[in-house]
Amino acid sequence: MSVMPEPALEHYLLVALLLFAIGVFGVLLRRNTLILMMCLELILAASIVALAAFSRFNATAEAPMMGGNVFVLFIIAIAAAEVAVGLAIIVTLWRRNQTLDVTELTSLKH
Amino acid sequence: MPTTEELQTIVAANNWTAVLPELLLGVLALALLMADAFWPRHRRVILRATMAAQGAVLAYAVVLFLRADPGVVHVYFAGSLVQTQATELMRIFFLASSLLVSHLGWVYLQNRSLPRTEFFHIVLVVTASLMLLVQAGNFVLFFVALETLTIGLFILVAFCRSSRFSLEAALKMLITGAFSSGLLLFGIVLLYGLAGNPLLPGTAEDPLNFAQLGAFLGATGAAGEVNAAQPLALIGAVLILVGVGFKIGAVPFQIWIPDVYQGAPTPVTALLAVASKAGGFFVLHVLLAGPLAPMWDTLFPALAVITALTLLFGNIAPLGQHNVKRLMGLSGVAHAGVLLLGLLAAHTVDWAFAAVLFYLCVYAIASFAVFEVMAHLSPEEDSDQDLTHYTGLMRRHPLLGGVLVIGVGSLAGIPPLAGFIAKALIFVAAFQAGLYALLVVALLGVVVSIYYYFGWMRAAVLREPLEEDPGDGRWYPQPVIAPVAKFVMVLLAVVTVVLGIYQAGLTEVVGLR
């Protein structure tokens, strides 16, 4: 029976990088506003994972690196506020236009 | 773990009176909502009282500025809050902008069936977060203040929620704003991870602190390896600069600007163009002169290219633009280019940052004069503000026309108005710093910018007013100007003219001697 090795910093960073890449490419390539919001949240999630991992693995007896862990809480609160406002805007826009496709938002052109 | 004594020193540094103006604004914002809920019938009185209270906070900030000693840096909250004379000046700047935006909001909302209390509330919150943003000495406060600002602006841009233009602008700003914040945050996290690495020389105990991060990036190991040359440091710094670049609208991160400026309600456009942009530039300077200073040599070529592109795009894109809100947005990109030039010069010329602050003040005064006129002339659908609405304005409304000509002339940098002196100071700084190629681009840009600004002035001054309604939406909205609005407009115009001739007052305030 093999023992699962303890995940190291690289593994967490790989996950964070993947989340970040999915988020960035999603924002750049997708057209549905709800999926765009999800991708924006993925970018923040990537930062959260990386912050927590750095705080855990960089901590020493002299420098416990609690700043990163505290920062994570702030980021979660900010992400929640952003989603609340974002969804409110998207819902209002949906009621008006009955579409969620960003390519159809072209009224602001001169 | 920190000992009890260490915790006591940390608590002793938590000087809450240092953030009294911000606290007062926060309390005022909450009190406004409560008062509106309890006495909805006295809304006008409550809103007037709010503006008066804001004026009192502004007076307090002026006192704080006058009492601040130049060159003295106060650090509170374990390095989270850094106060200098410049941050005290920015407090005054943001409070004055907030008062003017509230006034514009009053003018703008009185003919529309939109909630006013909430508008005032969010403007107060946004102002408090801007004031905290420029004082941030730590990435946690920096990011929280920046996001409070950005999310508040999302709501304000979407404020005309019955207008599809306003909503569309809000969605575009939501996506670009949140995206740029995400990039910025990831950059912060990468620098945090690198600077906290105990195996590298000069490991920072608190890598989120600006000063400690700067010390880490400037450290060199025993084998001569430089922390600033680490690839992770470079990626982190670039992501942070891209994030800030979005906020200040530097090319190629300016894509959101024309649409959002056009769709947002006019007072919010003014807030975006003046206060939010000024905050972005101040923060950019804090970052470049602080934590990212050891990487200057690596970052400079990229910044120089961005400055050149911003100057070129900002002056070419507004040519042939008929919508004045888009015109303000696109020409704002050109002003961002000049300010970037000033920031680049500030690395070698020590008075160049004072020139940037002077430019920001002059730009704010002239912009508010123009936006004030725009708010009075805005038609029912706010985003359709066309150059034709200004045809013959000088004859129809000499006051609005005169203020517009002075404001636009100052933005174009025509002597003897204040905008000319402000531009000249930045160009002299750039010359002293040896940025000759960029200076040539900037000077060419000024020549082009006079052309498109002149188109606006020509419509207002030289063209005859239309005699009757052509029925194609070109007919003028009829402005009703309250005495307060007249006073504000005349004041802004007079200050613009006076600063063009006699600068000693403001140059002393910003530290140019």
Image: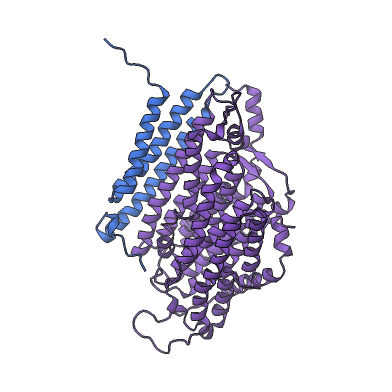
Tell me how many marks there are: 0
From this view, report whether residue B374 is shown above or below residue A63: below
> In terms of image quadrants, where is residue B296?
top right
Q: Position of residue A5 (x, y in %)?
A: 35, 16
Residue at the extreme front: B437
Image quarter where the N terminus of chain B lies is top right
User: Where does residue B204 sit, x and y in percent of width and height?
Assistant: 58, 29
Q: Colour of chain B?
A: purple
Left or right of B97, for residue B251: left
What residue appears at the point 57 percent right and 31 percent down from the top-left corner?
B226
Q: Is residue B59 visible?
A: yes
Among all residues in the image, which is located at the extreme bottom? B467
Write down the quadrant of residue B183 in the picture.
Answer: top left
Point 40% across, 58% down: residue: B158
Where residue B361 sits in the image (x, y, percent)? 62, 61
Q: Where is residue B267 in the image (x, y as percent from the top left)?
A: 49, 64
- Using residue B202 as the reference point, say whether residue B122 is left or right of it: left
